[in-house]
Image (cartoon, helix red, strand yellow):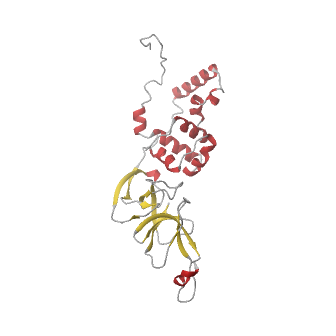
Amino acid sequence: MATKNGRIIPMNASVGLYDAKEERSENIIGQIIANARKRMGMTQQELVDYLPQFGVSVSKYAESKWETGDTVPGAYQLMAVCAALGMDDVLRYFSKKSASLLNDEGERKAMEYRADLVASGKYRPTQKHKIRYVEMPVSTLAASAGTGALLDDDNVEMISFPENTIPNGAEFGIRVSGDSMEPVYHDGQIVWVKQCDTISVGEVGIFTLDGDGYIKCYDEQEPETDVQEEFTDVYGELHMQPVLVSYNQNYPPKPVMPASDFRLVGRVL
């Protein structure tokens, strides 16, 4: 096809087969990243930890939003993801180093061979099922990662999420508020929670302490001398003191006193 200035735009069989608006509405890029990551046997955190080797640093929250389609990676972020996940077909067209592996004649032969394979009809990919969405309860009041925010079990809204983004055992979601759990949990992020009665040291949970809600890492310490009596039972046994710990070291640990109204809401998955 010729333009007004006489420039020739090459036409080929792929013209009209790509629709950016349609593909974004179906979250094609997010699905490709998620499927490739799972084929590699990597968790989202493992992919995030691997990407700096390719010149890209992002949070798990940002990578998760790529997969759900809430955002899309930038051009160079996408190239790094492709390199990390072994998606060489994409790199062959967009990476300078990979493009140099074949000269023009080699590229032409590769395209002809691909066209032959497509025309044969023998190598068409299996049709994938569309993403199934499920409704999950999400608290309308945030769990504070900093100063604390009141939690109320009755304040929930139902929101649809791709089924494959909900961890097994999740019962409800709650938004993080503040930055004290950075760099793992971020302000505004929805975390998934399983209700439980006990939690182990080192696990992250949702807690209420004197009416305020927190997302913190659970720890225990030997009580200070001046409060040991309050942690000693009628048999004379000294019990460990619960402590809520922030990942962000700018926030000091928050010891729990016996007189406090302290409850475990659930464990963060």
Image: 77 above or below 160: above
Q: Is residue 52 left or right of residue 187?
A: right
Total numbered circles:
0
The front one of 149 and 137 is: 149
On-image quarter of the N terminus: top left
- Answer above or below: position of 177 versus 258: above
Q: Say whether residue 53 is left or right of residue 115.
A: right
Q: Residue furthest top?
A: 6
Question: Quick check: can you spot residue 41?
Answer: no
Q: Residue at x 39, y 70 (%)?
A: 211
Vertical order, 132 against 210 (above or below) = above
Q: Nearer the viewer, residue 255 or 240?
A: 255
Taking the spot 65% from the left edge, 26% from the top edge, the residue there is 100
**Residue drawn at x 46%, y 42% as measured from the top left:** 128
Q: Seen from this angle, which residue lies furthest bottom? A: 235
Residue 234 in picture, x, y percent from top left: 53, 89
Residue 88 as seen in the image, left or right of residue 257 = right
Q: x%, y% of residue 203? A: 54, 65
Percent position (x, y) of residue 95?
Answer: 60, 31
Residue 233 appears in view? yes
In-image side of 188 versus 79 (left or right): left
Rendered location of residue 179, percent (x, y): 49, 56
Depth check, front residue: 147 or 10: 147
Taking depth in this image into account, of 46 and 206 the one nearest to the observer is 206
